[in-house]
Image (cartoon, coloured by chain):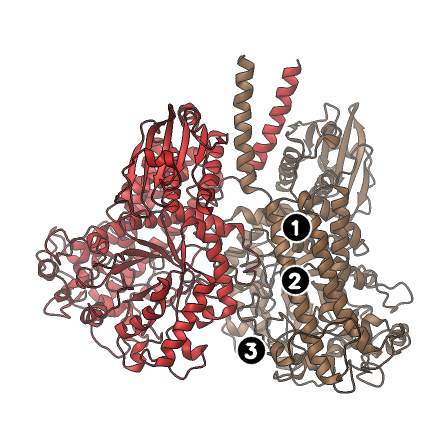
Chain colours: A red, B brown
Amino acid sequence: MRVERFMSGLALILLALVGAGVAHAEDGYALWLRYRPVGQTWDARYTAAATQLVPAGGSATITAATSELNRGLRGMLGAVPGQAASVSRDGAILYGTPANSRVIAALDLPLKGLGNDGFVIRSVRVNGHRATVIAANSDVGVLYGVFRFLERMETREPLAGVDVRDAPKLKLRMLNHWDNLDRHVERGYAGLSLWDWFTLPEWKAPRYTDYARANASIGINGTVLNNVNANPDILRPRFLKKVAALADVFRPYGIHVYLSANFGAPVAIGGLKTADPLDPKVQAWWKAKADEIYRLIPDFGGFLVKANSEGQPGPQDYHRTHAQGANMLAAALKPHGGIVIWRAFVYSAQNSEDRAKQAYSEFKPLDGKFADNVMVQVKNGPIDFQPREPFHPLFGAMPHTPLMMEVEITKEYLGFNTHLAYLGTMWAEVLDTDTWQHGQGTTVARVLEDGKGTGLTGMAGVSNIGNDRDWTGSEFDQANWYAFGRLAWNPQGSAEAIARDWTKMTWGENPQMVDAIVGMMMESREAVVNYMTPLGLAHQMATGHHHGPGPWVHNLSRPEWNPVYYNRADANGIGFDRSATGSDAIAQYAPHVAALFGSLNTVPDKDLLWFHHVPWTYRMRSGQTLWDSLIDHYDKGVATVAQMQRTWALLKPYIDKQRFDEETAFMEIQHHDALWWRNASIAYFQSLSKLPLPAGHAEPPHDLRYYEAIKTPYAPGQAE
Amino acid sequence: MRVERFMSGLALILLALVGAGVAHAEDGYALWLRYRPVGQTWDARYTAAATQLVPAGGSATITAATSELNRGLRGMLGAVPGQAASVSRDGAILYGTPANSRVIAALDLPLKGLGNDGFVIRSVRVNGHRATVIAANSDVGVLYGVFRFLERMETREPLAGVDVRDAPKLKLRMLNHWDNLDRHVERGYAGLSLWDWFTLPEWKAPRYTDYARANASIGINGTVLNNVNANPDILRPRFLKKVAALADVFRPYGIHVYLSANFGAPVAIGGLKTADPLDPKVQAWWKAKADEIYRLIPDFGGFLVKANSEGQPGPQDYHRTHAQGANMLAAALKPHGGIVIWRAFVYSAQNSEDRAKQAYSEFKPLDGKFADNVMVQVKNGPIDFQPREPFHPLFGAMPHTPLMMEVEITKEYLGFNTHLAYLGTMWAEVLDTDTWQHGQGTTVARVLEDGKGTGLTGMAGVSNIGNDRDWTGSEFDQANWYAFGRLAWNPQGSAEAIARDWTKMTWGENPQMVDAIVGMMMESREAVVNYMTPLGLAHQMATGHHHGPGPWVHNLSRPEWNPVYYNRADANGIGFDRSATGSDAIAQYAPHVAALFGSLNTVPDKDLLWFHHVPWTYRMRSGQTLWDSLIDHYDKGVATVAQMQRTWALLKPYIDKQRFDEETAFMEIQHHDALWWRNASIAYFQSLSKLPLPAGHAEPPHDLRYYEAIKTPYAPGQAE
């Protein structure tokens, strides 16, 4: 009787907690670190392997690792194991470095060659007890190992007999935030900037720590806090104090802070008359600024610079080269161990050369001229983060310069936050492509893994993170943040395996559901390519915000800002001739690749109109005409979205209401937008080709004028 | 043994839930509707009074009431009572209208005179059982009663023998959102606009419902979604569909949607050549627009209009009066039951009359000229939401026109979100002031409660709500949203009682803690007045963003935009002479009040420099010189903040970590800012008075030039 009453009391409390839980449940804040109860199948097994925490050392990083283990185990297993100074029972988790633990040192683990960030997770016996050791050469490596350990539980991998040895293939795994000082995020679709400059440095919101946790969980170790279109004010003491407060929060998680530096800062805020990199006063100003920064932030990472690009100041304003500009900044940072990341994204207002060629033309001759603490940051493709681009010709073409690849995690050109488009496949496509620059097998991934003797390797992703509750504006956009981190850790990773891990952690373990979601993700980016820019088309988006179609736009002030510059469509045909008969952009690739892209016989269909101008009636290798194939692709894109909607509808029983409803609404928007893209594009191209649609394909329901009149004012993420 | 294992399993689940709970706990999202467990003292008592839910009727509003009861009781008592069609056990809660329940009708409750929104909560016997009835004349009244019932539990009031009969004194209790279509909130310090126009109407985020719940819980029944500086695009079909989606979400909670209408819309988006209110085409355009809106939103509330004010278009552009403009819109809305709310906040670029007089001068002559579905919205004071202003002279001065009072919940002039300033005291101060316009006792509250035969009464608050997790940018700013609702319901309410209720619901029931927090709140606004604008000073804020001091600013294009216009400080003295020897603004008040304000013998110290220009050496009634008193007030303001910090520090054991830490940081900012205000203001005024500081008061640590040079770029909330 008394037991019953006690039980009923417990039940009440349970109900209350469930109630409280439900109110907050599954709003996306937890990201992939949800740590939900593992359920009966796994509970006993995992619990047996997590009975005791034995940390080695007491650094802030080890404390963070302990805190994460407590959080994860409490969430997944319902209990926090006790902490001990040494392994004293079966199921202990021992974590640390050989330097801080004689026990770990004595295990003689294969830590050599794992560098600073690698780790070993292994089932061992210590003091006669079963234990799992998580060891590394540094505390940050230990933290990475702890996150991997927890991820194994989240993805329901066995812990018994675990034997993992892993290390990142790239040294710098970095987010680029295009966040302005007024908290507007350029190309941001997830609310305001996370950085609340107004309440920093006094208020270090807990969310900053959760940001660091999420990044550390996927190995991201650098963050550029401000927009590459850089406001010089970030370098003023007032803001540097705020930057330092963030760096303090991120430090235990192994994340270094970088800043975008405005090359004109010595003039804008330094009171100098010039920013000429060869001027001693300018050099002294930057040296003093670097010294000032490092006094506040001893582990400051360095500067990211967008120079002489889209109106930004740069060394060419003083008739100096990019190398001279970069090296001047590098000299200021060098004594402190900082680096310069110099963007190769340049195209000139004066230069009439094919825009796709200009970065290569500008930077290739500078190979070997950069200081050893300079990296050149190259976008994945030669234009600008389009749904599909061939790889950038600079990859493999600068044998003496460490290159960092820049990808755009935020979906500026892929439907913002409301279109489901998993970008892991896009990035893997580029990374896996063979540049042939040093013979077969010189994939982009391998180019990136080569530090050219400097040890500097890396990958940067333009962040899709904002202050929306779910961080990225949609659940599925979290996958792109996650996939970026995983691919930056291992550029040879599998996009599908990454999608699968993310899905299990984000949506749950039901295998049918996981298969369905991974299936949707894997085809999602191709769907976007198909309904927006099939067959190698690019940059067909509306002006400014890049939301929706604008293939007809031709009146912008610079030719290469107009979609017609890219589609070159007229009564006869469509496509940009970059073969030897055209701009000859193909000549920037290795001969094998140039030959592949340069010939209509070998160019992949997906890149056809990127490299060639062909008649509407051009016969594809499939036998279809180009025109019919184009229409087919648009409709295929729309159909894939419709299919994703049907799949998603079936998942209702498996998914919590809020996340299910939101994605349902977003897919409704995506389907609407996909149809809009399809109809508007066909209406425009048909106005030139004058060809009928192939049988079974519906005419656009409105005339071209209707689509041209659609405006999307107040679209989020615009450049200010 | 088996029981033990079951218990231990339960304990595990409990721990997991506690863990999950802690991760999300107390981030402010729940507002005052936290519904935390009531604890042992109250559990049995409340549980006995909440054993069964017996709703009458099945409207969306009654469903919302049931849902709220379930949420509240689950949170506070740990269990959801069963639902039944009739009272069948002791402790039932019966709620509905007599029209929908013969049982309620038979109880013969005193519902007469309670109108649409009033309610009765009473302990009764039904079918021989103890029950609580929550009854009203409409379902919305029932919902209000349900929220009041839950509030009694949240504030630990007894339920046994409950007998509450209440109704709002004002008909319209309304939020004004100054939200732009790009989601920037003018004078917003809590992130972006809640309204995510980009994903509406497809995605109706759950937060929209929580917004409606919070408002309904304090009786707010109207919301103007967009900025009074109105973008005409809100009236386009594309946006009206989105507005309708929000209206659908809000409707069950008794909240009507209003829009700010741009008077120039017929020209801007209607293709007309004029917006002249007497032009039949203009009248037809607005009529058609109103018809279009009501087709989408049958219960649309009406238009709020800022006309011929700070650059907005208006009827005066066509040499028509405000009444002619308002009546034209009113005619379009009238057939649908909509109203026009016309702002009296006008001051002319041409008019050199004391700005404090202009609204009265403009509107007083129009009394009696407005249609019967027009209200005139008057700010609490004659200038613009300053930390302290005397009441607006229009209150009581328009006997034939229903007036709505507009207050600013968002702290544009009171330190944004980081200064603790409870505004309940400020609003109560105005509401309680006697205008003497119709003899003694004609308080502002009574003026507002008089609908002048139209039945239209109301109060509007400029929202402080954004998409920050805690809604208002700080915990304490939630109190201002709450207090606004409570005072709009009952303008004669007590600011302290409201603060006490809010504190219990928001921070917890510990009486010492509650006393301490209420104490802080009650003195907080006076502290701001003291360190910013003591003794009747006003508008001394820096330009544009209004953050920090700028008493020296004199070079803005319009005289009345400059702080020197308001302080009129020079070598001889300080203050704005609005007495008969000056601008004679006092003449706009009733004779008794004019005499009070007009004489140095009777003017309250707090209003001294608002109404009088006096020498620095002027002898106050206290015996102090004005100069010494001024310094005293600045220092008192700073000292009060320091005292609040000390009090807050003592509260650490009572308060959860995140909320405690945040407020600690914010108070650090507030203290810094208070000192800045004090030092900058003294440095400036001392540069004119040349007087030494009284003994015991420290000199400003920097010279005036230092303070003048401080800039706050990127401050949040600026007008765009």
The local secondary structure at tag 2 comes to helix
Residue B632 visible to the viewer: yes
Q: Which residue, given by chain and number where applicable, does mark 3 sit on? A: B274
Q: Quadrant of residue B17?
A: top right
Foreground of the two, A496 or A84? A84
Residue A617 at what x, y percent from top left?
13, 60
For disc 3, the neighbor class at 10 Å (few under 14, some 14 to 19, many from 20) is: some
Same subunit: marks 2 and 3: yes
B527 w.r.t. B590: above or below: above
Q: Is residue B163 left or right of residue A685?
A: right
Return the disc, 1 or 2, that comes first in the chain's sequence: 1
Q: Which residue, given by chain and number where applicable, does mark 2 sit on? A: B670
Q: Is residue B427 left or right of residue A588?
A: right
The local secondary structure at tag 1 comes to helix
Measure how far apart labels 1 and 3 are at the Cα level: 39 Å
Return the disc, 1 or 3, that comes first in the chain's sequence: 1
Q: Residue at x 71, y 64 (%)?
A: B406
Task: Tell me whether circle 2 and circle 3 mark residues in contact (CB < 8 Å).
Answer: no
Foreground of the two, B80 or B336? B80
Foreground of the two, B14 or A675? B14
Q: Which residue, given by chain and number where applicable, does mark 1 sit on? A: B215
Q: Chain of mark 1?
A: B
Return the disc, 2 or 3, that comes first in the chain's sequence: 3
Amino acid type of the residue that numbered disc 3 sits on in the rendered structure: Thr
Amino acid type of the residue that numbered disc 2 sits on in the rendered structure: Gln
Q: Residue at x 74, y 52 (%)?
A: B486
- Which numbered mark, 2 or 3, is in the foreground of this view? 2
Q: Is residue A180 left or right of residue B439?
A: left
